[in-house]
Amino acid sequence: MAKSAAAIPAEVSAEAQALRAELQEHNYRYYALDDPQIPDAEYDRLLQKLQRLEADYPDLITPDSPTQRVGQTPLSAFATVTHELPMLSLDNAFSEEDIWAFDRRVKDRLQDDSDIEYACEPKLDGIAVSLLYQDGMLVRGATRGDGTQGEDITQNVRTIDSIPLRLRGRDYPAVLEVRGEIYMPRAGFERLNEKAREAGDKTFVNPRNAAAGSLRQLDARITARRPLEMCAYSIGYVEGEVPGRHSDILEALRGWGLKINREIQVVQGAQACIDYYRELGERRTGLAYDIDGIVFKVNRRDLQEELGFVARAPRWAIAYKFPAQEEMTELQDVEFQVGRTGAVTPVARLKPVFVGGVTVSNATLHNRDEIQRLGVMIGDSVIVRRAGDVIPQIVSVVTDKRPDNARAIEFPEHCPVCGSPVEMVPGEIVARCDGGLICPAQRKQAIKHFASRKALDIDGLGDKLVEQLVDKGLIQAVADLYHLTREDLSGLERMGEKSAENLLEALEKSKNTTLAKFIYALGIREVGEATARNLAQHYGSLDELASADESSLQQVDNVGPVVAHFVAEFFEQEHNREAVDKLRKAGVTWTEQAPVDRDSLPLAGLTYVLTGSLEQLTRDQAKERLQALGAKVAGSVSKKTDYLVAGPGAGSKLKKAEELEVDIMDEAGLLELLSQWEAE
Ligand code: IVH
């Protein structure tokens, strides 16, 4: 029952205050310092404890309490806000010459030819925002609007955890306007779209639109469910003292609890700016969020003032843009590809277009639902997006430009390769060719998979060669590979005598493999390398695995009902059992081993964390090899961590491990450890 103000015992009030301070401190460590000290679950427990106290004693609630982020009453419209100081935009640069010219203009105006100190910052691709703090309390959040007037989005910005409701410490100015960018990190964007796709809702075309759409909600409860973040990049109106250098202002903002982008660097001169642009440009696709350029700012505030503004942009800053990640082109045709498991995927054939740094002529259309959702037709002008290594996507259709002869895309009812019926499995969005290994497309993919590096590693058996072998009828199934002769190979394109010999040797060599690799090579749905290894360790022999039922399979590490079903189904099918038999008869052998009791593995009970970059191994390889020896590999350092493997560039995890006195090893140490135990 809620109790009145008079009834609040002093210790309860003190506890609420302490909890609030503790939560604020954890938020600061998480967002501003990027160095969380407690797991998310522990944070949630503290928050719930505070919620319970506040429910019992509503008079305890303060507007800056972390429980008060989400307002419960939707607005009918956004109020207008007039910015105390206009929110400016930036001039753009598109080439190195533009940067040299900018630097020249700055120096000429300042009548000083020495190197200028610049702050280099990623240009975050989101929505500009102004946050007003009075006496340390967040009192208003506003959009940029036309630069002079924006919209009051206070309710919405309050829901963003990286925006402090109250500033930390005491030395902040009495009035402080913080400016920055609200954006949606890519992982959150992908998850949001995935959920929308599953629910049959409209998806967002890119993280920027998703951020904008999320902020434009009159009901802040919707905004609260969206994975938004905010990084501060400058200040606006201030009553009080602030440091004389832009970079020191950002540091001060960080101390007051705001998130500052961690890539920001101060450099001397234009060449260093260009070097920074190139370096971050290379890492652009690996960042957790979209950036569309680099902003260079004269770091000294006195010089900024001297330089002033032209029209709507400062003379002391410039945005050097990256090549666009979205471009318009024409959808010329749609073809349907059949994958290893029969999945029929529509592939867009595009008029070639330069986007995201490469020429793109194909893009995936995912599945039938996606075609419907986009409402796309052959002949349409479409927007293609290629963000980094991500496969190019069609994100929207410019319907205004639809030509009269545009054609609807017809999803095939029969497999374009083998003619078997294409089926939709209830509950799955993917259409599949029913042909199984009768279908040459599926066969080709299955053979390519069998020969791939992580499977039987048949050197020299590339995709093109597999296609020729199947098309010429030289092989039907994987086992046929082992009956290929020199004569068979001699008639193939680009196959000299030496290559033929090498291939036959590689085939011979591949016959001796491990059980784990053999299981992986079979290409059972959802059975990747790690699962194959777990299955091999658990059962020790292929016959044991082949006769296991679904409930037994679910006892294996990381095998759930779906994987268990696919494995059991695979071995129930006559043609699969025959394929395995034929491989055995062709001489493929693997070392069978006694089933492994994971608790008896050498690293059982130990938890490792990997951080920084490794040079000889990929993270995944290191993880799998540790797991194969029984170790657990966790994502963050805690008291339960036994060892941290730290490569160059290790940051907060290394610091944390040192604080917690966790044992630390480098990559050489890891390799030594692995080789010591793997040999046994
Ligand atoms: S400084 C007077 N810094 O880019 C300086 N802007 O046209 C004004 N942006 O709408 C902005 N990252 O929202 C600055 N590190 C950064 C930025 C940044 C993104 C956006 C900003 C503005 C647009 C500039």
Image (cartoon, rainbow, N blue to C red):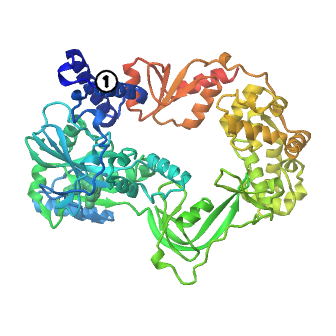
Q: Is residue 137 visible?
A: yes
Instruction: Determine the residue positioned at 65% across, 21% down.
Output: 677
- The residue labelled by disc 1 is 1
> What percent of the width, then of the height, locates residue 10?
19, 16
Side of 2 relative to 452 (left or right):
left
> What percent of the width, then of the height, locates residue 517?
74, 37
> What percent of the width, then of the height, locates residue 408?
61, 74
Q: Residues within 10 Å of mark 1 (few under 14, many from 20)?
A: few
Quick check: is the Cβ at mark 1 less than 8 Å away from ligand 1? no
Instruction: Determine the residue positioned at 80% across, 65% down.
Output: 419
Instruction: Determine the residue positioned at 8% across, 40% down.
Output: 241
> What percent of the width, then of the height, locates residue 654?
40, 27
Side of 156 relative to 430 (left or right):
left
Amino acid tagged 1: Met
Instruction: Determine the residue positioned at 63% across, 24% down.
Output: 675
Q: Quadrant of ligand 1?
A: bottom left
Seen in the picture, residue 293 relative to 574 is either above or below; the reply is: below
